Image: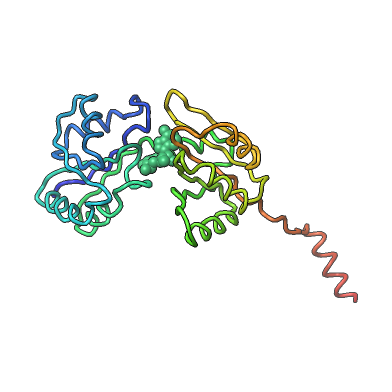
Amino acid sequence: KGCLFLVPTPIGNLNDMTYRAVQTLKDVDLVAAEDTRNTKNLLKYFEITTDLISFHEHNTASRIPELVEKLNSGLDIAQVSDAGTPSISDPGKELVKAAIKEDISVVPLPGATASTTALIASGISPQPFYFYGFLPRKGKERTDALIDLANRNETTIVYESPYRVQKTLADLAENFGNDRQIVLARELTKLHEAFLRGSLTQVIDYYSEHDPKGEYVLIIAGKPESKTETMSDDQIIEAINRLIEA
Ligand code: SAM
């Protein structure tokens, strides 16, 4: 049987491609890519001539049996998305599941992802964190997600498109409160990489005067743990003694 390699690609800066990623894309028999035109350019840049096949959210159902058959027949396949790590808010997970079911080796390569790249520079506690990805766009699903996230103590990571950043910030303020700390990491690894740090009110004010541009990761501080009264051992003994005497 062949192997399924999961290969991260850069999220902006081509120098973030790893040596192993280049070598793997050269070595495999086939690259399954979210957008073949996009990946063709990447392969050209790294002088990789491996054949490409499209694998995206709209052809998952028909492609998976085809790719599994090729893997079973001995071909090695690398799966890539347009940018970053496959399966992270990108196609991949269904193919991984199908490969595991068929006892095909799944080999993940470490590499670029916007999520932890934003997290480590945010200045907000990186542990524990909760990766959410894209919020549902509307309706009850969105409301439920916002309520759930607002009550989490973990730092939350959300992906957002520039067209919805302002609306999402307004919804976050409504559910999380104006004072919750947030960091907007924009255009990571690219020329206009920037971080905006502050309370939800502060960042909303900023974006009332500036149009959001580029790709965004939102790092939102967790809900502060409610402080419960704790007693020292001496205080506990004193309290028990008082109860006994009463
Ligand atoms: N698989 C990717 C990863 O590992 O991060 C995520 C793909 S998802 C379809 C695209 C979203 O990731 C964007 O809308 C944005 O929220 C985030 N993203 C990707 N590249 C980014 C970058 N250079 N700077 C900031 N956010 C980025």
Q: Residue at x 20, y 42 (%)?
A: 32
Q: Residue at x 13, y 36 (%)?
A: 51
Query: In which of the image's four quarters is ligand 1 placed?
Result: top left
* Callout count: 0
Q: In this view, does 92 lie to the left or right of 76?
A: right
**Residue lying furthest right in this view?**
246
**Residue lying furthest left in this view?**
73
Q: In this view, does 166 lie to the left or right of 13?
A: right
Image coloring type? rainbow
Q: Where is residue 139 in the image (x, y as percent from the top left)?
A: 48, 60
Above or below: residue 236 compared with residue 92:
below
Above or below: residue 146 compared with residue 127:
below
Q: Which residue is drawn at 44% across and 41% down?
A: 161
Using the rendered view, name the quadrant where residue 122 is placed: top right
Q: In this view, does 63 lie to the left or right of 121?
A: left
Q: Residue at x 31, y 34 (%)?
A: 9
- Identify which residue, 191 or 79, lies in the foreground: 191
- Can you say which quadrant of the picture contains the C terminus? bottom right
- Identify which residue, 129 or 81, lies in the foreground: 81
Q: Where is residue 166 in the image (x, y as percent from the top left)?
A: 54, 42
- Identify which residue, 79 or 126, lies in the foreground: 79
Using the rendered view, name the quadrant where residue 148 is placed: bottom right
Q: In this view, does 234 lie to the left or right of 117?
A: right
Q: Where is residue 170 in the image (x, y as percent from the top left)?
A: 58, 47
- Identify which residue, 109 or 113, lies in the foreground: 113
